Image: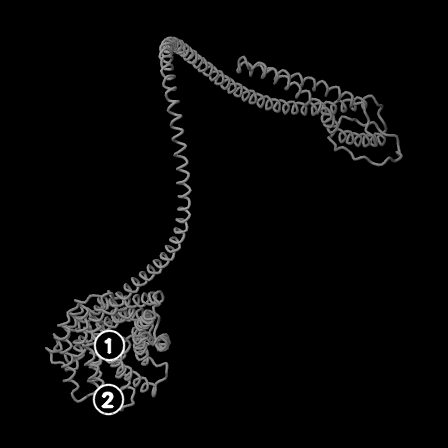
Amino acid sequence: MSGPSSRLRYSFALLLALQALTPLPTAFAQSYRDIAKEAALKGENEKAVVNFELALSSATKLFDENDIEIVIRRGELGEAYRAVGRWKEAVEQLDYAWRRSRYDAETNHRWNGKEGDLAFGFAEKLGRACQASGRYDDAVMAFETNLSDAERTGRPAGDLIAPAGLLADTLLLLQREEEADKAVARALAAARKAHANEPPALARDLTMLAQIYHGQLRYAKALPLAHEALALAEQNFPDESRDVGLYQSRVGALMVLAGEDDAGAKSLLEKSRENLLKKQTRDAVELLLVELSLARLASRQGEFDLCQKHAGEAWRICRMHFPSDHPETGRCYRQLADNFTAMEMSEDAAGLYAKALAIFEAHLGKDHPLTAETHAIVVKAETQLIAEREQAMKEKAMVVAEQKARIAAEEKAKADAAEKVRMEAEEKARVAAAEKARIEEEKAQLAMKAKQEAEEKVRKAAEEKAMLAEAAAAKAAAEKAKLEEEKAMKAAQAKAAAEEKARLAAEEKTRMEEAKAKKAAEEAKMAEAAAAKAAEEKALKEEKARVAAEEKAKVAAEQKARMAAAEAEKEKEEAAAPAPKKATASKSSKGTSEKNKKTVASLKPQPKPKPKPEVAPAAPPKPVVMAEPVEEKEKEKEKGPGVAARVTKSVTGVTGAVSGAVTGAVSGATDAVSGAVTGTVKKLFNRKKSDSGDGDRGGNGKEEKP
């Protein structure tokens, strides 16, 4: 059969492979497209979508939007979307590709050219996408337009078969059976015209139309077409060929589903399996329909072991060739569920029916007849399961009721015995009650008399009680008034106590605030005292520095005076001595000059000599002036700690006086402290000065140790 007439049976991958398309001049676009086609052939539909999108994006950079290459890329992308179930995107892309290619074919009068082929192909794909997404009216519009275009433009008769068949399938989904039959008749007429001299091709078209009725559960209408296709196959193919086996399996399956001639259906299915196994293995997918049909037939005839055998074989083949969510897998689930239902295994059947229904809803849609039929079976199975559970509960309740009835009978026997005993006891009680009544009557008469006497006593007692009650009420009123008065007094006292408490609390709060303020004032005064103390210490440091400077100047002056005195003494000695001889004088002058140099050197400040080991002197030691500043400094160092201690003591006393006087006036105390500190410093300075003078006088008479 030609390409256009067999589009209905082509898969997405085959349609891509059969299209003769002009390659893109860019390597990147062609590469994306090749990768997408390879992925589609392998069933990697998600990968195909990604690469077709990239191919379209690359092509839009090279071609105009209305170029035929862009139209082709959009159609390929739409078909890829359809393969992964992205119906909205698929419809958008395919609708654009169909309308554009149809416009180009009409405008350019190219219905029999490439544009026309593309328009017919995209119309079929668009209709399929609309049908799969539940947009049946849009699908009918696409198929009818496609069929009308083919008839109007004089396309070959073979091009009318697929659109007419798809239109019939969609109309059956919409329950428009009469229109669907007309569409099938148009497809059948086109097939007979196109393949009048090709019986095998006509047989294939007849099988395709029979499958449309089969898929919509119209088995009675599918059988004549299937029988005619089988007759053509048997006339044109060898008796034992694979093709004959396929046609036999389809007719046998339809006979089983239609419930016609079970024996003939079984014979035909067994012949089909024999023919298929001659050229195929036991794992061939063509055997799936045969095994499912034999399992259904065995289940109907009550041969459950044989049914389980065929159903297990069908399930094995199905798992080898189809994924878990494929419609064929759903049919296997349903057949197994039918078997369990026939074997009264309702719980197992309900689970398998639910799995089959989920698959049919996902792939065929909720409106598909097979889905609707399965849904009805699921509802029936669930209802039956509920009924069986209710029946089991009723049976259990009956057993419980019988047990309860038996227990009730035993209890009744015990109750009858107890009733007899009770009646005897009642008779005895009646006799005793009569005797008791007589005695009670006598007692009542005596009681009546006693009652009258008692009533008289009660009346008198009531009068007395009323009087006592009045007195008690008066007393109670007086006591109540007294209690109210006491209560008022207590309330007044409590109020006074509360006011006193509030007053004391206010006084306590005032006292605490005053104490807090006083404490803050004291802290401020202490801070001022600390500042005064710091000022005093600073003044003391400055005074000490001044005293040290004056002391240093004094020492320098004393050294200068001693040097002047030594010079004067020297001149006095020279004036008192007789004039020596010239040579002697010269020698003496020389000695005197050296002696003066030594004296001057001794007057200069010398570092403190390091102690040396004692050695016997070569000559008597000469007297040396011991007024060196170094020794004076050492004496000051020795005296210094004592002076500092006395200053600290004095300052401490002054600070105590200041702390005592702070409670008076802070500013006055500060002035007093400053005066006291100044006086104390001056006294200490004078004392230190006098001590330093004594030290100088004492130091002149000392000799330096060797």
Looking at the rendered image, the disc whose residue lies closer to the viewer, 1 or 2, is 1
Q: Nearer the viewer, residue 18 or 269?
A: 269
Left or right of residue 508: residue 682: right
- Which element carries disc 2, helix, strand or loop? helix
Label 1 sits on residue? 259
Dot 2: within a 10 Å radius of its alpha carbon, few (fewer than 14), some, or many (20 or more) residues? some
Say whether residue 362 is visible. Answer: yes
- Classify residue 79 by image quadrant: bottom left
Q: Which mark is residue 234?
A: 2
203 shown above or below 383? below
- Where residue 690 sits: x, y (%)? 71, 18
167 shown above or below 427? below
- Classify residue 453 by image quadrant: top left
Q: Distance between the residues labelled 1 and 2?
A: 24 Å
Left or right of residue 681: residue 332: left
Say whether residue 103 is visible. Answer: no
693 shown above or below 288? above
- Where residue 669 sits: x, y (%)? 56, 15
Locate the N terminus and report the quarter of the image it occupies: bottom left
Scheme of colours in the image: one colour
Tell me which amino acid carries mark 1: Gly
- Where residue 37 sits: x, y (%)? 30, 75
Q: Which mark is residue 450?
A: none
- Where residue 452 sits: x, y (%)? 36, 15
- Which element carries disc 1, helix, strand or loop? loop
- Residue at 33% from the left image edge and 60% from the top image edge: 391
Q: Which of 197 and 247 is in front in this view?
A: 247
